[in-house]
Image (cartoon, coloured by chain):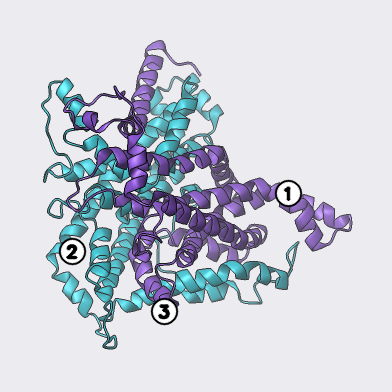
Amino acid sequence: MTPVTEAASPSPLPPPSPPSSSRWRAGRRPGEDRPRGAVGGHGAWFLVLPALIPILVLSAGPLLYGILLAFTDAQSGRTAPTQWIGGLNFRDLLHDTLFWESFRVGLVWAVGVTVPQFLLALGLALLLDQNLRLRWLARALAIIPWAMPEVVVGIMWRLVYNPDAGILNETLRDLGLGGGRDWLSGLATALPAVIVVGVWAGMPQTTVALLAGLQNTPRELHEAAAVDGAGAWRRFRTVTWPALKPIALAITALNLIWNFNSFALVYVLTNGGPGGRTRLPMLFAYEEAFRYGQFGYAAAMGCVMVAVISIALAVFLAGRLRGGDDT
Amino acid sequence: MKTGRPARVGQYAALLAYLVFLAFPFLWLVSTAFKPPRELGSLHPTWIPKDPTLDNFRQAFDEQPLLHAALNSLLAALAAAVVAVLVATPMAYVVARRRTRLAKAVTGWVVVSQAFPFVLLIIPLFLVLKNLRLINSVPGLVLVYVVWALPFALWMLAGYVRAVPPELEEAAAVDGAGRIRTLVSVTAPLLAPGIVATGLFAFITAWNEFFFALVLLKTPEKQTLPVVLTHFIGAEGVADLGPLAAAAFLATLPSLVVFALIQRRITGGMLTGAVKS
């Protein structure tokens, strides 16, 4: 499960880019960090190192290594030495229709999950911000999707979607809408079915983030607008939304990234089937790397995924921020 | 706030719809876990098992090494949570108390690290851990989990540190307490609840994690609970529903209990993060 707390980041996200080691070095230039306050210069070093070393060795380092791998023919279990092959992996990727199909599925999935997730979460957050009874129950229930292991979420929805013993088909039969549909292995229904699960699984984090934003909106302004006769929609547009916008943008951007990179849910639900209809890019890259042992090629896929996400996010955030100035 | 009566009714109807949507899959999981095979095979499943049974649980333990997997999960999650908190707390303190480039770099890394596709990270990690002979071992997995939990732990802990007024530390210093003494007897007690909450959250995250465990752990006696759970689903996607549901239900309980304990604090930490920084 990915933590949601980052969503509270008050400033809009910078476009993600691989962390450069120079940035780290710049952060620790001795002239910048004059000893002052409760933590002295040398003291600060000892405090920072225990976290900095694992970050550099096991996160930043491997990331750079991974990018380098994309330019090699690295394979699992091969005895011949790995060689530089330049951009060959990327040239192959360009012509790999299966990969682009998977990429398309990944985009449909990411947008298809993120947008309804946001709208539903916004609705729930607005409700929870009201003085309703049963609020405690909704908060308690929201724990379930959030705390559950993704694997269990997948298993649970398999039980719901089960063609015979599943509650979905049973309910449809009761309502006289026909039944016997095999949701997860139908070519047309598989992707929508897993998208519903994705929405369900990620809703609580988004709701909590938006609720946090709502509770920061100025109450007095809201009441003043009501006194002036502004309707609910108008109050939402002129008072609530401007205050909520930074958090809404941050959580939506993060959701897009998380969803595009998601793996476990769909692995358990369909394992990419039927016929690749739900094969997200992560599933594709996982198979390429750990079933077929094509480390270099899979790393190239990872690079393309990062690049496309970065560009998409930059465009999304730039557009949103500019569009936001007039409201 | 004044809200008209019809609007209130609408709000309650919407809230009810949300409650049903959030709750029904879990209720169905629980219901399936207690159903005998005969009811699971029936074409007209019911919400409440007509003939509830514990056989599924017994069978689940017979079919897969669940206890052993739970032990592996517990070890990995506990070690990862403890190490992550130990390592992150001092850095979070520095990040929160000093507005330096380091603090900015850490914040930037927290955000950027959310964007990596894991596959770009796991291939090199796999190769590195293989060279260290840490593949297919719980310690190797713990290393990965620590790094994976760090961004979040740093973020949360920095928020909790900011909530401790620096004036308290200054006052202690004026009273003649040394730097270490100040940290131990003034800051640490105030920070303790936040540290516990962060540790518990790291614990759940590791307990639930699937992808790294799937890649790094090869033999069943090393595998963690989420990986073993997927073994209930056969190659053709056919699963013995009863034991599957029973095992999934059991695997969720620790997460739900721990999360229920800390939920308010996680939400609270997020709020202070939003307001203060």
The chain coloured purple is B
Drawn side of residue B277 relative to residue A85, left or right: right
Q: Residue drawn at (25%, 24%), measured in percent from left and top?
A: B46
Cα separation between marks 2 and 3: 30 Å
Residue under disc 3 on the same chain as residue under disc 1: yes
* Left-right relation of A326 to A42: left
Kindly identify which chain the residue marked by label 1 belongs to. B
Asked whether the viewer can see residue B13, the reply is yes
Q: Secondary structure at mark 1?
A: helix
* Colour in which chain A is drawn: cyan
Picture quadrant of residue A148: top left
| Residue visible at 45% across and 40% down in the picture | B253
- On the same chain, marks 2 and 3? The answer is no
| Front-lying residue, B262 or B17 | B262
> Residue drawn at (50%, 72%), measured in percent from left and top?
A56
Report if the CB atoms under discs 3 and 1 are less than 8 Å apart: no
Q: Which residue is mark 2?
A: A99
**Where residue B12 appears, x then y in whole percent?**
39, 19
The residue pinned by badge 1 equals B189
Label 3 marks which chain's residue?
Answer: B
Q: Hey, what amino acid is under mark 2?
A: Phe
Neighbourhood count class around disc 1 (C-alpha, 10 Å): few under 14, some 14–19, many 20 upward: few
Above or below, A75 relative to B101: below
Q: Residue beneath label 3, please?
A: B131
Residue nearer the viewer, A3 or B224: B224
* Residue B209: percent from left, percent from top: 41, 54
| Structural distance between the alpha carbons of marks 3 and 1 | 42 Å
Counting from the top left corner in percent of width and height, residue B90 is at: 65, 62
- What amino acid type should be assigned to the residue bearing mark 3? Asn
Q: Nearer the viewer, mark 2 or mark 1?
A: 1
Of B229 and B269, which appears nearest the observer? B229
